[in-house]
Amino acid sequence: MKKNRFKGWRSVFVLLLFFFIWELAVKIADIPEWLLPAPSTIMTEAITGFPSFSEHLLSTIKLGVTGFTIGVGIGLFVAILLYLLPFVREVVYPLLILSQNIPVIVLAPLLVIWFGFGMLPKIIVITLVCFFPVTVAALDGFKQTSPDLKHYMKMAGATKSQLFWKLELPHALPSIFSGIKISATYSIMGAVISEWLGAKSGIGVYMTLASSSFRTDRVFVAIFAIMALSLLFFAAIVLIERLLIRWQSKGVD
């Protein structure tokens, strides 16, 4: 435990060193603030501008959580469906992989044309970003169920439903949470991209306004806020995973 904490502090130290070098380089080279603001300038803007930024922050959190919840739900449903229906999996799974080769940023304008500027196209964008990692991870988890345990339960007279709910689903939970953690980090990014489609508030809107007025410090505030939110989402999923999967071996971190 102490060793892991020390590793964490090493990352913090490297990050602080990076900010120090950044601050020093901007001061020595006398780089204008509109081109590259110093970390101290960004920090000042984050504190003084927080009252106006908080509205955008809350809007993105609501959008991200909503899209993430729907995306994870659809991802799990699709994974269970494909696992229980092998003939459907053979047809649909290659198409799912193919669909991920289409950049979301390319689909976004089409979604606006088809569904307008309301919430629906934004939720669809986040769902598209979030559901695929959960589907792939859950499918892999289901497939990795111990064949010996399955054989033992079948010998004991277990039905297909009992096999799934009492063996395959619990066995796949670590893999499912791996997919959910990836989706959690993607959800905020998806929310910001969806806000670029057209919204009244949100970090994406804040970034657009800041870049159009050459407020580079505000752009960096938005970037750091996105990173912080993604980390918070990830940490929340890790906490839920530890509470639900107490039997999982901790292994080597």
Image: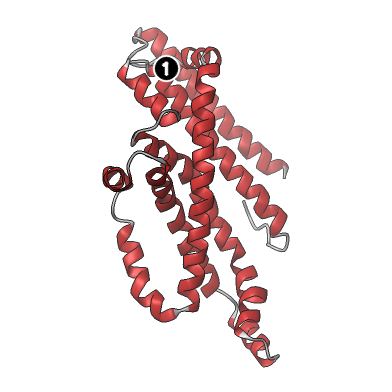
SS of the residue at dot 1? helix
Tell me where residue 148 sits by quadrant: bottom right
Direction from residue 101 to residue 54 in the image, left or right:
right
Q: Residue at x 43, y 46 (%)?
A: 123
**128 in relation to 18, above or below:** below
**176 in relation to 231, above or below:** below
Direction from residue 249 to residue 108 in the image, left or right:
left
Direction from residue 181 to residue 239 in the image, left or right:
right
User: Total of numbered circles in the picture?
Assistant: 1
Q: Quadrant of the N terminus?
A: top right
Direction from residue 28 to residue 59 in the image, left or right:
right
Q: Residue at x 30, y 19 (%)?
A: 212
Give the percent coordinates (x, y) of residue 249: 68, 61
Give the percent coordinates (x, y) of residue 56: 49, 27
- Report the residue marked by disc 1: 217
In the image, 242 versus 250, the foreground residue is 242
Give the percent coordinates (x, y) of residue 181: 54, 50
Give the percent coordinates (x, y) of residue 70: 50, 53
**69 in relation to 212, above or below:** below
In the image, 92 versus 237, the foreground residue is 92
What amino acid type is highlighted by mark number 1?
Asp
Q: Residue at x 54, y 31 (%)?
A: 58
